Image: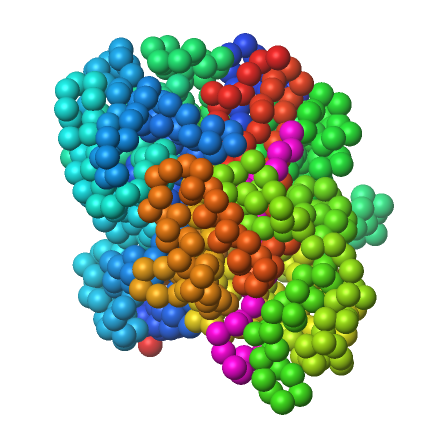
């Protein structure tokens, strides 16, 4: 187990390094942030001064070397625009994004699994067919468009839910959380559902396929022959076998939920990390972009690790080995 | 979440639906977020606008960017380089301390410290100041290196903080510590990228604001901002996307305010190089150096149509770089008429009867509708026989490359931050050098223009200075060093029952929002 963990850690470190080199080089080629940030009334001399103060006058490899040295001590640099440590900026906004992603994931599972099981058990019923039609819509309509439609319907026309922003928060262990206030939940509902829609459809389809397949297998017939009630067959035997592909997909999707929250966050003015990175890219705020991507890599690695460990719990045939 | 629970939640939230304009509470939807609570850290529109709600300068800019007394009630010019300001009596800071001359001295001296690591610092506004002295508690004397007619304009950008704040760092202010001014509102809280909350300063030196609590929320996405307005989540929004103007005008209970803005959209042409990468005639030379060609390009533009069709009326055709009513506006110069025939004749006269090849570069995410405006302009050029292709790029890529002179023909937008003509003539048209013309990406250069402008910069006499600025404008517009296209309008949407006069600098100041 420890060998396994060590090799995963090493993988993560290598990924981080490669990613940082690519991003550093890429941003260097895109342009000079000073041209975007500096007031056009400033003189060329003042421009040079700013370039110097950001260290952009040094050769790019030297800039990278300085970044690397600082990064190893946990300092990912100060944002050009905020003049605050980039890492702090991101960590401040992370709870909002994680909350949104978690709420969306929860919706995907709570709605997706039961609907998927039903569609798998009675594939020819009219309700099952409606579920499948819904899932096609969920797949194919673009998130930002659905988000805008939802705002127009629920916030503007019906006036049931607020159109944007995060509601009242309460501090839980020093982290502001909005799911414990009514106002917070009302603000969370639309963006979370918007973000969840695609995942709900995905979960429905995977669950349905798994159920359909598993129901044909011999052990289900044996269980029936043994006289087990249908309910137990479905909830214990069939579901457990359906879970394995589901865990793989959900693990991957959790990462993409956090990454794709960008679109939803922009439409619903949700104060998460996604909005920060979009702004940072627009003004080439390199420290923030780098820090954000590094955190994303770490997060993906952790999620993948968790998925692997979950496999071994659900399916004892899977063993964790280092290589 | 089960459907039943969801329905319950929906029902419950109806009760929470935003109350319509409750007394003395105002929620404003902004288009851009404040990146720092330190009013002296970063010169950028959203920060300066927010600072104006909380801080005052010695003088302020009114809604047309003209100078009005603020913390100084009057001033006199002692000699060419010495100014004396009489301060307002009985003003207190939000922390209750008295405002005195020492605070002014400390605030001006804080600028260099606050500009440490700033992407665009306030130093340009104080660099002419040699010394600031408190003569007595209500008199400040400022000495400058040389005659500085723009001193007042510059001082209007410098927020006055209490003297104790001299040592307060930008980080401390960002954490909410020491955000203390004399303005109509005092700071309550700031969630970066999300919202700023302020409350009324009852001891304000002028009439107190109409609002007890004001919340500024940030909606960068245009549709989200409009939706927030339509759903009643906010009482007013700034910068209406042009496509939604009609819809908001038609909406019940919503009023739209549109005023001429201080940002001119202009075209910049490479005039410095014999051979230019994206503008070539048959011999491979740069045709844009010929003033007749530039005039032809200007005549080919139907400015009215651009403003009407593409900007949905949110703009005013421009024939020079500052809008009417600004110091240095030359009333004799009007926008070129739409005259493609005359344009073709001029091209023929210049030796290009069959036009030439041109690639026109523009940003696509910096100004409202920038890429659509660029496409339209490209079509106008094609109609007079210039083989034009249009390429638009994200601002992050575009501006660096434009500064490196990688293009031949570009579009830009310049805001008149100082409220008078030299603030935009200088950066765009002055001969490029160490200390001038940073925005002169076309490398226009005319010694006559330079001398008129630099003389204006040293002339304290208002009338003479106005004449010099008009002269400089006339020279530049005869040469067409840049082609002005139109001024962007600034827009706001307001719920019924409140009023906002609008501002040419586009700032949204809660103090000026009044119940009807």
Residue at the spot 65% in from the left edge and 70% down from the top edge = B292
Q: Nearer the viewer, residue B464 or A36?
A: B464
| Residue drawn at x 20%, y 29% as measured from the top left | B141
Vertical side of A282 occupied by A60: above or below: below
Does residue A95 belong to the magenta stretch? Answer: no
Q: How are the colours assigned in the image? A: rainbow
Residue nearest the viewer, comparing B178 with B301:
B301
Label total for image: 0
Which of the 4 quarters of the picture holds residue B432?
A: bottom left
Point 32% across, 70% down: residue: A17
Q: Look at the image and tell me whether residue A66 can be seen.
A: yes
Of B509 and A95, nearer the camera is B509
Whole-percent x and y of residue A174? 31, 32
Quadrant in the picture for residue B178 = top left
Q: Residue at x 45, y 14 (%)?
A: B209
Q: Is B410 on the left-hand or right-hand side of B432?
A: right
Left or right for B49, reference B337: left
- In this picture, which residue range is highlighted in magenta? B257-278
Q: Position of residue B252 (x, y in %)?
A: 75, 23
Horizontal relation, residue B504 to residue B493: left or right: left
Image coordinates for residue B14, horizontal then vertical, percent: 64, 20
Taking the magenta stretch, the answer to whether it contains residue B274 is: yes
In the rendered image, the quadrant that contains the N terminus of chain A is bottom left
Q: Is residue B248 above or below residue A230?
A: above
Q: Quadrant of the C terminus of chain A?
A: bottom left
Left or right side of A241 for B51: left
In percent of width and height, residue B367 lies at 58, 51
Residue extending furthest toward the bottom: B283
Q: Is residue A322 visible?
A: no
């Amino acid at each position: 187990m420890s060998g396994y963990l060590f090799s995963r850690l090493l993988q993560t470190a290598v990924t981080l390094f490669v990613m940082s080199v690519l991003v550093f080089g890429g941003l260097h080629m895109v342009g000079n942030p000073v041209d975007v940030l500096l007031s056009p009334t400033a003189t060329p001399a003042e421009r040079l001064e700013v370039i110097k103060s950001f260290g952009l006058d040094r050769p790019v490899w030297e800039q990278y070397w300085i970044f690397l040295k600082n990064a190893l001590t946990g300092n990912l640099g100060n944002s050009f625009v905020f003049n605050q440590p980039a890492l702090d900026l991101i960590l401040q906004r992370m709870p909002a994004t994680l909350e949104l992603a978690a709420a969306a994931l929860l919706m995907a599972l709570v709605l997706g699994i039961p609907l998927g099981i039903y569609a798998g058990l009675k594939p020819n019923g009219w309700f099952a067919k409606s579920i499948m039609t819904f899932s096609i819509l969920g797949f194919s309509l673009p998130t930002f468009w659905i988000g805008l439609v939802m705002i127009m319907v629920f916030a503007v026309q019906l006036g049931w839910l607020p159109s944007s922003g995060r509601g009242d928060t309460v501090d839980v262990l020093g982290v502001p959380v909005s799911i414990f206030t009514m106002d917070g939940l009302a603000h969370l509902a639309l963006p979370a559902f918007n973000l969840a829609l695609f995942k709900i459809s995905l979960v429905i389809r995977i669950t349905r396929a798994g159920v359909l397949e598993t129901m044909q297998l011999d052990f289900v017939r044996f269980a029936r022959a043994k006289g087990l009630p249908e309910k137990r067959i479905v909830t214990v035997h069939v579901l457990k076998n359906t879970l394995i592909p589901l865990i793989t997909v959900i693990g991957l999707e959790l990462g993409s939920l956090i990454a794709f929250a960008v679109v939803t966050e922009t439409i619903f003015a949700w104060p998460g990390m996604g909005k920060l990175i979009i702004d940072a890219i627009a003004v080439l705020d390199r420290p923030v972009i780098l820090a954000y991507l590094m955190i994303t890599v770490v997060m993906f690695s952790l999620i993948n690790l968790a998925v692997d460990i979950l496999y071994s719990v659900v399916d004892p045939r899977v063993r964790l080995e280092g290589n | 979440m089960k459907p039943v629970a969801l329905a319950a939640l929906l029902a419950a939230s109806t009760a929470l639906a935003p109350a319509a304009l409750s007394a003395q509470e105002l929620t404003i939807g902004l288009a851009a977020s404040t990146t720092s609570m330190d009013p002296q850290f970063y010169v950028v529109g959203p920060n300066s606008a927010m600072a104006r709600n909380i801080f005052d300068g010695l003088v302020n800019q009114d809604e047309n960017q003209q100078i009005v007394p603020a913390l100084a009630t009057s001033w006199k010019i002692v000699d060419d380089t010495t100014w004396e300001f009489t301060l307002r009596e009985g003003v207190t800071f939000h922390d209750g301390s008295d405002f005195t001359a020492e605070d002014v001295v400390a605030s001006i001296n804080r600028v260099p410290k606050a500009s440490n690591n700033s992407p665009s610092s306030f130093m340009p506004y104080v660099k002419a100041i040699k010394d600031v002295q408190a003569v007595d508690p209500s008199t400040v004397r400022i000495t400058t290196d040389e005659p500085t007619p723009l001193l007042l304009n510059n001082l209007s950008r410098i927020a006055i903080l209490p003297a104790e704040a001299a040592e307060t760092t930008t980080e401390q202010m960002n954490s909410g510590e020491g955000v203390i001014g004399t303005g109509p509102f005092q700071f309550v809280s700031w969630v970066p990228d999300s919202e700023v909350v302020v409350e009324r300063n009852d001891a304000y030196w002028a009439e107190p604001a109409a609002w007890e609590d004001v919340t500024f929320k940030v909606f960068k996405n245009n549709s989200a901002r409009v939706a927030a307005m339509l759903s009643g989540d906010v009482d007013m929004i700034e910068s209406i996307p042009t496509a939604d103007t009609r819809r908001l005008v038609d909406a019940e209970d919503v009023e739209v305010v549109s005023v001429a803005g201080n940002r001119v959209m202009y075209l910049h042409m490479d005039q410095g190089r014999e051979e230019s990468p994206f503008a070539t005639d048959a011999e491979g030379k740069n045709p844009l150096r010929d003033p007749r060609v530039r005039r032809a390009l200007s005549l080919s533009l139907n400015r009215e149509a651009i403003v009407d069709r593409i900007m949905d009326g949110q703009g005013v055709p421009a024939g020079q770089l500052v809008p009417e009513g600004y110091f240095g506006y030359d009333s004799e110069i009007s926008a070129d008429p739409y005259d493609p025939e005359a344009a073709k004749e001029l091209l023929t006269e210049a030796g290009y009867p069959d036009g030439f090849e041109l690639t026109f570069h523009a940003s696509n995410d910096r100004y409202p509708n920038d890429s659509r405006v660029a496409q339209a302009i490209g079509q106008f050029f094609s109609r007079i026989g210039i083989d034009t292709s249009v390429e638009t790029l994200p601002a992050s890529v575009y501006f660096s490359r434009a500064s490196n002179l990688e293009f031949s023909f570009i579009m830009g937008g310049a805001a008149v931050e100082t409220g008078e003509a030299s603030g935009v003539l200088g950066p765009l048209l002055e001969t490029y050098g160490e200390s001038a013309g940073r925005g002169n990406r076309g490398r226009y250069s005319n010694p006559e223009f330079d001398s008129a402008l630099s003389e204006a910069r040293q002339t304290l006499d208002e009338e003479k200075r106005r004449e010099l600025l008009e002269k400089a404008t006339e020279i530049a517009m005869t040469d067409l060093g840049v082609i002005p296209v139109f001024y962007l309008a600034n827009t706001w949407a307001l719920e019924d029952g409140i009023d906002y006069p609008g501002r040419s600098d586009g700032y949204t100041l809660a103090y000026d929002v009044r119940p009807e």
